[in-house]
């Protein structure tokens, strides 16, 4: 598990080097224009949507490690070629390889965490993953910002080379991991594999969680660097430096609050925790509305806008030990890879649709934008409470269920031994 967490940090560190500067690199440094830069960002989403349905079955049949290694090599090749590409065609092909590789990493690593954890340790394991991802992205972006120079293509080539090196280093680390054996579809009759997606879509609790996940990612993550940023600049007059401060505040709250909220979250019903996040985000949208529509001073508008991102970070810290373990607990034995990939597919779809809807609204329809996403946040709470009625006691409230077993003289499941 420690090696998997190191791998998560390495991949996030590598992505942090390039993600904030991708648009500038394609549009300005390579001189390919805003249209090509926009297409590159779209290619990332399209590549993920294409490969994720196949990634789930591959993880189930072959195990997460081989799939992860293929994804890492693909992403490394995509990153390196992106740093060397000078034409629109090669940039788009490279972006497709990088996007496909990094999309498959998520469910593969999540499945490895499931295989190396128990019901007792899973929430903490996913909280640690989210903490390290944000820390890696923040540190990578900070260092990358000091290395880039828009007047020198070579500085960006160096960034993409470092990103590729991080992926390859992660591949080397992962080859040393020995995960406990987890049942695969290959161990069962072939009809189980053919019915994998049918079985998943027949799980009404999982389908409801996927709908909830789409709204979560659409109303929050899909707005960070699109609609909410545009709204801040156009409606609240936020400077680019203040926008950077807001993003830093989001990461800082996640890093500081992650383990402070973990003990609180672990002892509450998961559905109610998600419902509480919806209410916190509703408050965040109200604060954002005050920043842009409240006719206040620039200092107050900036403070309110930064507070909006901080409130989103608090909600994210509460979700990380809640949603991913719930996906794992809903998956039948041997199907964790399929369920993780399906949820990642929904996430990518929301991240593709979110900016397309929120960007234009945030830039020009300021009041409707705030009201729309305020209602989406309230909808998160409603959907979460509805999901809670479909979950079993152990799925929705695992911590007390485990303690009742121990109190009756049973034993909590021991961690599955794995080589350190």
Image: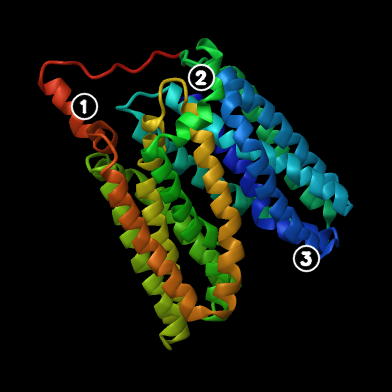
SS for tag 2? helix
Compared across the picture, whether 62 is left or right of 207 comes to: right
CA separation in Å, label 3 and label 2: 46 Å
Q: Is residue 266 above or below residue 403?
A: below
Q: Which image quadrant is residue 26 in?
A: bottom right
- Residue 362 shows in the view: yes
Image location (x, y in percent) of residue 48: 64, 43
The residue to which callout 2 is attached is 192
Closer to the eye: label 3 or 2:
2
- Residue at x 21% of width, y 26% of height: 402
Are discs 3 and 2 less than 8 Å apart at CB?
no
Q: CA distance from mark 3 to mark 1?
A: 54 Å
Asked if residue 154 lies left or right of residue 279, the reply is right
Residue drawn at 46 percent across, 29 percent down = 199
Q: How far apart in space, not on screen, are marks 1 and 2 (Cα)?
A: 30 Å
Q: Residue most toward the right?
A: 87
Quarter of the view holding residue 35 = bottom right
The residue lying at 79 percent from left, 43 percent from top is 94
- Residue for badge 3: 34
Residues 50 and 78: in front is 50
Residue 21 appears in which quarter of the rendering? bottom right
Q: Up-down: is 179 above or below 342?
A: above
| Callout 2 crowding tier (Cα within 10 Å): few <14, some 14–19, many ≥20 | some
Residue under label 1: 402
The spot of residue 213 in percent (x, y) is 44, 48
Q: Residue at the spot x=22%, y=34% of the render?
A: 393
């Amino acid at each position: 598990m420690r090696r998997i967490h190191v791998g998560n940090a390495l991949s996030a560190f590598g992505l942090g080097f390039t993600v904030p500067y991708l648009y500038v690199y394609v549009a300005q440094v390579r001189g390919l224009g805003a249209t090509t830069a926009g297409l590159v960002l779209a290619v990332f989403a399209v590549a993920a949507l294409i490969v994720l349905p196949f990634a789930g079955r591959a993880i189930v049949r072959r195990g997460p490690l081989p799939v992860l290694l293929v994804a890492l090599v693909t992403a490394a090749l995509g990153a390196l070629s992106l740093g060397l590409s000078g034409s629109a065609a090669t940039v788009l092909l490279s972006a497709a390889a990088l996007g496909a590789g990094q999309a498959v990493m998520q469910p593969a690593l999540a499945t490895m965490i499931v295989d190396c954890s128990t019901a007792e340790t899973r929430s903490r394991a996913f909280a640690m993953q989210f903490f390290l991802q944000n820390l890696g992205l923040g540190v990578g972006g900070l260092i990358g910002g000091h290395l880039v120079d828009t007047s020198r293509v070579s500085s960006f080539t160096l960034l993409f080379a470092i990103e590729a090196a991080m992926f390859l280093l992660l591949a080397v680390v992962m080859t040393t991991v020995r995960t406990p054996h987890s049942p695969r579809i290959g161990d069962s009759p072939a009809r189980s594999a053919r019915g994998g997606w049918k079985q998943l879509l027949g799980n009404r609790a999982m389908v409801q969680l996927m709908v909830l996940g789409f709204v979560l990612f659409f109303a929050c993550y899909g707005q960070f660097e699109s609609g909410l940023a545009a709204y801040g600049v156009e409606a609240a007059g936020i400077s680019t430096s203040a926008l950077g401060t807001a993003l830093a505040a989001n990461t800082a709250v996640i890093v500081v609050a992650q383990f402070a909220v973990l003990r609180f979250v672990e002892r509450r019903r998961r559905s109610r925790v998600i419902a509480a996040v919806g209410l916190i985000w509703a408050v965040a949208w109200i604060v954002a509305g005050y920043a842009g529509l409240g006719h206040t001073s620039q200092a107050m508008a900036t403070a309110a806008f930064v507070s909006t991102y901080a409130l989103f970070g608090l909600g994210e810290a509460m979700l990380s030990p809640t949603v991913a373990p719930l996906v794992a607990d809903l998956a039948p034995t041997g199907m964790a890879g399929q369920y993780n990939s399906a949820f990642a597919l929904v996430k990518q779809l929301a991240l593709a649709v979110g900016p397309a809807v929120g960007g234009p609204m945030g830039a020009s329809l300021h009041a409707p934008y705030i009201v729309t996403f305020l209602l989406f946040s309230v909808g998160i709470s409603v959907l979460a409470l509805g999901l809670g009625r479909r979950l079993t006691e152990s799925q929705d409230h695992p911590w007390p269920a485990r303690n009742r077993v121990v109190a009756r003289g049973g034993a909590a499941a021991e961690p599955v031994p794995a080589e350190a």
